[in-house]
């Protein structure tokens, strides 16, 4: 049928994935007749866009019919479709819409977050491998060695090396990789090629799944039963009741460190999998993944897979496809794992739910718990949060009955909490001891190592010293691109480094301002502590775990495995050593500086400090022997330190929530951060002032029924970053659909200053 004979045509409303927020809307394209069976809601297509008709990837939002007359009014046609594997199903499509609406990101940003990274290139990132096999008989069975040798003799002589190849293939009984076959037969590849050319062997192409953790998989068909203590059983029964009740719900598994929360979670996962449903198990740090992966891979074998940012693009793509096909029933991963396309999802577990790493700091600025709650609401299943130090928001919801509180107050086996001691570092300085490690901590380390036990030291600062400073004029070298001082590093990364943008330079021999050679170190980091440990304890085997030592693939696993297997005495690191790890031989924990995060310019500083200290103290004495913790501080009598040492979360919660209520901070209000950035400082200031005036006027008029309080504009904590200045405007409000519409209208504004960009973060 020609175009003139057709009465109706199909049109797709699409969203351009790279469109900015101001034009993130539907555009109509005619669907060519040969694509009509291929394009539907959720399809990814390629379209000509703009005056230059440049090719852009787009998401089909809807398909409708139009008449012939309307079809001839200059509508452009879809140019091509992307591989069908990238099409979003209804659940993924709804997830993209929610993410866009909830965080005010573009639909394209949502799609690129939900789908694998390779969707940006528009091709399937599949790896294939060569496989060698025996020819088959008519009944489908492989030829025997004698039959294969006989067939080979028809085309020439069979050498001893060729016989070994055929024998190796016959013994295997299944296809082998060429290199594996050559290894087994002890021949070169040329021998293999000769047999392939004669048809005595066959070559095929087989899809290869990439999984760096494949060697950890267990082989047991039935996982071993989990035996729970009385307290754990009670917690499990409460969690199970949530699951069996059906419908969307949330539980907070609130257990002290070492209480066996993981066993309760595994027992619940066993039940969910037994119902032929799938599970997402989330952990906050890549550093926690190896230990968790080993537990889950050994228990669930081929049904388990991993998602985190250090996997290659191909490894993530293979996991995504296996989840989508239903081969994987349980995914273990960090923040992005919440988007895994699991079939028949029946449970999401968010372990260490208080961790800030579950909140994305780049667009889309989502929180994993919001995504989990949305998916639970869509499909009707529970979300289980677990922590020894829950976020105030979560405990507040549990207190109000929105979450079901599932307490677990006893350490497994009745093991007591570690004995803690707070060291006054002011007294150390007065005594002339200037090392970051107090005499008391050094003595405890010596005793621990003498008993053949292990220790963990925590300091949430990397590098050797925080900065260099001229003793004569006070000059501190700063980053030329950011408003931060440069951190002094030694070893492989020696030099002055900006921890914000990555800028690096050589250490100056003299002060760049006055020429004086009296440069001194200010502050200290993990490298300095490592050097002091080596000087005071020369026989100690030390592993350092921070961003500098874990930048390469597999480095987390190597360090943690080495420490777990007793190849080191002391594990020194930043916050990645503080939570979730279970090292039976660790009897001592040292907190080198408890003050590092206590006085940060953030209303959550006390909460994060309490959580870090409580978690790291809980690493000691988990296998029966009494654990010890030594906490160093220049404010040793601070109430928060004493609460952390007692592991008294509920007392901390009462203290902190009363303060938050009095000052109107979350969870008693919502906070919205509007950030304006520009390379032009003058334009940024002018634009921020104008925009704030517009916001206040709109709030007083159109949104007068929605109480909002405005603060700013003021400089961001790092005012200049990567040569761009940043100003913040903070709004306290109660988020709802109308308030989100207010902020959406701000992002859609065409700012007077073209050099200024705006982003919004609904902080939780």
Image (cartoon, rainbow, N blue to C red):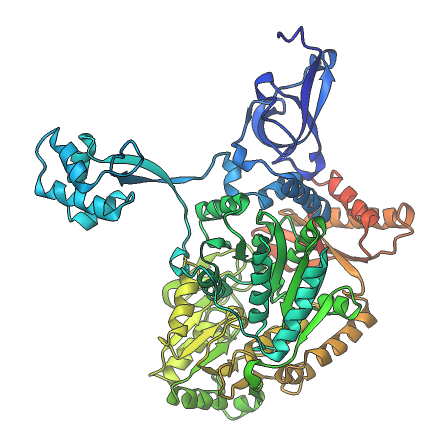
> Along the line of sight, which residue is nearer the eye, 179 or 346?
346
Describe residue 721's horizontal placement relative to residue 689 as left or right.
Answer: left
Q: Position of residue 574 (x, y in %)?
A: 51, 70
Count of numbered circles on the image: 0
Furthest-front residue in view?
139
Query: In the displayed structure, would residue 423 be above or below residue 29?
Result: below
Q: Who's the residue at 69% across and 48% down the image?
A: 759
Query: In the displayed structure, would residue 220 be above or below residue 19?
Result: below
Q: Position of residue 206 (x, y in %)?
A: 36, 39
Q: Quadrant of residue 398?
A: bottom right
Q: Position of residue 40 (x, y in %)?
A: 64, 29
| Viewer can see residue 9 | yes
> Along the line of sight, which residue is nearer the eye, 739 or 387?
387
Quadrant for the C terminus, please.
bottom right
Q: Position of residue 229 (x, y in %)?
A: 58, 78
Q: Who's the residue at 62% across and 8% down the image?
A: 1
Query: In the displayed structure, would residue 253 be above or below residue 179?
Result: below
Q: Quadrant of residue 413?
A: bottom right
> Along the line of sight, which residue is nearer the eye, 202 or 117?
202
Describe residue 399's horizontal placement relative to residue 127 as left or right.
Answer: right
| Viewer can see residue 360 | no
Q: Who's the residue at 31% across and 35% down the image?
A: 140
Query: In the displayed structure, would residue 180 be above or below residue 31?
Result: below
């Amino acid at each position: 049928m020609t175009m003139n004979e057709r009465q109706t045509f199909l049109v797709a409303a699409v969203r351009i994935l790279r469109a900015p927020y101001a034009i993130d809307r539907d555009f109509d394209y005619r669907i060519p007749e040969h694509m009509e069976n291929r394009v539907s809601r959720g399809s990814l297509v390629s379209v000509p866009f703009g005056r230059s008709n440049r090719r852009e990837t787009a998401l089909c939002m809807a398909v409708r019919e139009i008449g012939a007359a309307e079809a001839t009014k200059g509508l452009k046609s879809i140019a091509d479709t992307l591989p069908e594997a990238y099409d979003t199903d209804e659940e993924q499509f709804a997830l993209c819409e929610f993410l866009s609406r909830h965080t005010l990101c573009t639909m394209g940003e949502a799609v690129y977050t939900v789908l694998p990274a390779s969707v940006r290139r528009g091709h399937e990132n599949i790896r294939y491998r060569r496989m060698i096999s025996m020819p088959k008989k008519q009944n489908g069975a492989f030829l025997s060695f004698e039959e294969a040798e006989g067939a080979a003799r028809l085309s020439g002589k069979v050498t001893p090396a060729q016989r070994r190849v055929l024998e190796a293939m016959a013994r295997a009984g299944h296809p082998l990789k060429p290199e594996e076959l050559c290894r087994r037969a002890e021949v070169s590849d040329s021998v293999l090629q000769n047999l392939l050319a004669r048809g005595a062997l066959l070559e095929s192409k087989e899809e290869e799944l990439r999984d760096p953790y494949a060697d950890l998989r267990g082989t047991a068909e039935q996982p071993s039963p989990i035996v729970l203590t009385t307290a754990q059983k009670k917690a499990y029964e409460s969690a199970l009741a949530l699951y069996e009740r059906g419908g969307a719900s949330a539980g907070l598994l609130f257990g002290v460190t070492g209480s066996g929360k993981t066993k309760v979670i595994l027992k619940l996962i066993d039940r969910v999998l037994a119902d032929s449903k799938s599970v997402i198990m989330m952990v906050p740090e890549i550093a926690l993944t190896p230990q968790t992966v080993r537990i889950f891979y050994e228990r669930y074998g081929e049904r388990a897979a991993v998602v985190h940012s250090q996997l290659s693009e191909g490894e993530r793509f293979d996991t995504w496809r296996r989840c989508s096909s239903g081969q994987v029933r349980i995914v273990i991963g960090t923040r992005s794992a919440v988007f895994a396309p699991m079939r028949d999802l029946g449970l999401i577990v968010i372990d260490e739910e208080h961790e800030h790493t579950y909140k994305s700091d780049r667009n889309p600025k989502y929180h994993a718990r919001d995504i989990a709650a949305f998916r639970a609401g869509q499909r009707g299943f529970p979300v289980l949060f677990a922590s020894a130090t829950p976020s105030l928001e979560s405990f507040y919801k549990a207190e109000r009955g929105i979450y079901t509180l599932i307490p677990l107050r006893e350490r497994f086996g009745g093991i007591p909490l570690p004995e803690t001691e707070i060291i006054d570092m002011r007294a150390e300085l007065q005594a002339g001891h200037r090392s970051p490690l107090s005499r008391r901590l050094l003595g405890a380390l010596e005793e621990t190592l003498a008993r053949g036990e292990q220790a963990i030291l925590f300091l949430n600062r990397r590098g050797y010293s925080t900065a260099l400073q001229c003793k004569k004029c006070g000059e501190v070298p700063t980053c030329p691109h950011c408003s931060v001082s440069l951190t002094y590093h030694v070893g492989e990364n020696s030099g002055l480094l900006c921890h914000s943008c990555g800028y690096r330079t050589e250490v100056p021999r003299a002060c760049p301002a006055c020429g004086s050679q009296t440069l001194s170190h200010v502050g200290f980091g993990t490298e300095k502590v490592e050097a002091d440990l080596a000087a005071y304890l020369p026989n100690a085997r030390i592993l350092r775990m921070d961003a500098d030592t874990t930048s390469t693939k597999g480095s987390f696993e190597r360090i943690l495995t080495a420490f777990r297997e007793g190849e080191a005495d002391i594990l020194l690191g930043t916050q990645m050593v503080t939570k979730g790890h279970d090292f039976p031989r660790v009897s001592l924990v040292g907190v080198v500086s408890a003050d590092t995060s206590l006085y940060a310019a953030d209303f959550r500083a006390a909460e994060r400090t309490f959580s870090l200290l409580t978690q790291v103290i809980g690493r000691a004495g988990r296998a029966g022997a009494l654990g010890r913790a030594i906490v160093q501080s220049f404010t040793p009598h601070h109430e928060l330190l004493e609460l952390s040492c007692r592991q008294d979360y509920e007392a901390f919660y009462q203290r902190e929530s009363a303060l938050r209520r009095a000052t109107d901070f979350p969870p008693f209000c919502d906070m919205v951060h509007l950030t304006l950035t520009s390379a032009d400082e003058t334009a940024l200031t002018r634009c921020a002032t104008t925009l704030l005036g517009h916001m206040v006027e709109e709030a007083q008029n159109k949104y007068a029924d929605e109480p909002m309080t405005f603060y700013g504009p003021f400089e961001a904590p790092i005012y200049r970053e990567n040569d761009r200045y940043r100003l913040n405007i903070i709004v306290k409000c109660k988020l709802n659909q109308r308030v989100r519409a207010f902020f959406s209208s701000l992002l859609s504004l065409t700012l007077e200053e073209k050099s200024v960009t705006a982003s919004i973060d609904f902080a939780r």
